[in-house]
Image (tube, rainbow, N blue to C red):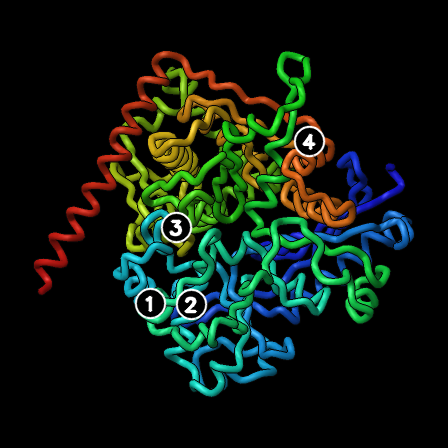
Amino acid sequence: MNKQYYIGVDIGTGSARACLVNATGHIAASDTQDTKTWRDENDHRIFEQSTTDIWSKICIAVNNVLQKSGVDKSAVKGIGFDATCSLAVTDFQGNPVSVTKGKDIGRAGGERNIILWADHRAEKEAELINSTNSVVLNYVGGTMSLEMEVPKILWLKKHMDSALFSQCQFFDLPDFFTYKCTGDNTRSYCSTTCKCSFVPDKGWQEDFFTQIGLAELIDGGEWKQMGAAKGRIKPAGTPVGQGLTEEAAKDLGLSMGTSVGSALIDAYAGWMGTVGARYTENGRISKAPNLDESRHRLAAVAGTSTCHLVQSRDGVFVNGVWGPYRGGQSSTGQLIDFVITTHTAYAELQERAKQERKNIHQVLREVLEKLCQEKQIESLTELTKDIHFYPDFHGNRSPIADPRMRGAIIGLELVRLNPFFRHRMLRGSRTRPSPDLAKKYYLSLEAIALQTRHIIESMNTAGHDINSLYLSGGQARNAVLMQLIADVCSVPVVLPASYSEAVVLGAAMLARIAAENVTAAEEMWKIMVEMTLPGTHVAPAPSPKVKKLLDAKYKIFRETIEIQKRWRKQMEEAAR
């Protein structure tokens, strides 16, 4: 059995990763290639990418894992994909179509044909959609995010020549790559339902698309620009087409006809790669979970942003959370980086980390611990008890679903300069001592944990029954953040055996499901459990004093939301 291998491909915000995995979830080889993102120096909302660039990096990564492992391509039985929920645009021959505002928008051959998930150009279009009260809004928490595909498609219609717009195919990015591999335009339930306003038990809603000005997509019921009509839609892992085409197989270094599983959005692959895990606690491994237990396990895929997913027997509709599918935070890892790199002490921090040969997060943690010792207090929460941080610097995805929310820090003070650096300040250096940076760093972690509690409480109030958090992604390395989340949310956090490979492991599970043509939910769950290695259990452990402080911080966190909304309304009224 172990001689059979599966390839998972994960297309993240800044890279394409391939992993070669056996049937027990052990990774034989992994390779990551950076991808390009274009920004607009005159418009901070714009993020664009290229399917041509990403496909080339996927091919390099897949060929590299075969070379590194020495595994023959004949042993690879399937390939599965996950990707960010970004909008890819091509013509009907699969050629990229430019999405960049200007004279070339809508023309085939342009390299930049992806509007990245983080792109916020379609705010007005999202506002129009949210005024419709359509049934599709029930499946996105009552409010459609401007990060979803339909607002972006509507924006493209407004800025494209109509003749060019009519020749476009629109893909959520995961579905583009199964199309690229197979030549089969079948779409996935995951992408079309979660990002493109396809209602799973009702299909495309013609009245909705007509109401928002996209009636041409209906195409007499064919929906050829959107796909997924008349049964051309598949559950996760279902084989797509006849497997790899000759051209795709040559590019990837695999065999023609290798099974290709219907794709997932990256966060959902992270769910697959984590929630089936057993875990080690007090030196013992927990028993294998059954399928019903999955509905108590919230998966959090925490990288640049964080996505939260949980499975339920029936649809649970949560205001401000993306329907029965997922919630999330638009900026978490990105927020932490922003707080660190924009502080005037960042250069000092880098230099100290370099001298001590430590990670900057370790240096910051040591600074915080020293501050606690000096002030003779027991916890970092007490150290920062008089400063309150609200984290929505890039708008709120969940549970408020308000892109206009903004970050805030309450309790700032003037900071005395370290005398050692004062002469550098006189010469124009912007260096500041690191204690202030360390506090702001900790506050950003605390705010992420407080917002996670807000999301979990909103989901459980609506009918979910979450009692544990299964976290993967780059933030799983941050032990302080992991313990904070456990303490703030009062739930255990389970970390995967490999924090960085959980998402791509989920994609490899899709490959195995396709290769074995598995269709029953129990059998899919069995594959997930078999391919997920035991994780690490982080239990809540706040002292009574820290628990009291965190609860008070959470109350203030919730009040901050209402205050910001009230202030915004007051200023809008004053500006009329």
Give the foreground label among 1 and 3.
3
Q: CA distance from mark 3 to mark 2?
A: 16 Å
Q: CA distance from mark 1 to mark 3?
A: 16 Å
Q: Are marks 4 and 2 in contact (CB under 8 Å)?
A: no
Disc 1 target residue? 125
Q: Amino acid at mark 1?
A: Glu
Q: Which comes sooner in the sequence, label 3 or label 4?
A: 3
| Quadrant where the image shows the N terminus | top right
Disc 4 target residue? 529
Q: Amino acid at mark 4?
A: Val
- At numbered mark 4, what does the secondary structure look like: helix, strand or loop? helix
Residue located at (28% from left, 65% from top): 128
Q: CA distance from mark 4 to mark 2?
A: 37 Å
**Residue 152 circle label:** 2
**Residue 84 circle label:** none
Q: Which comes sooner in the sequence, label 1 or label 2?
A: 1
Q: Which comes sooner in the sequence, label 3 or label 2?
A: 3
Q: Amino acid at mark 3?
A: Val
Residue located at (48% from left, 54% from top): 193
Residue located at (43% from left, 35% from top): 445
Q: Which comes sooner in the sequence, label 4 or label 2?
A: 2
Q: Nearer the viewer, residue 103 or 134?
A: 134
| Quadrant where the image shows the C terminus | bottom left
Q: Using residue 151 as the reference point, say whether residue 24 is left or right of it.
A: right
Q: Are marks 3 and 4 in contact (CB under 8 Å)?
A: no
Q: Position of residue 164 (x, y in %)?
A: 49, 85
Mark 2 Cα shell of 10 Å, populated few (<14), some (14-19), many (≥20) = many
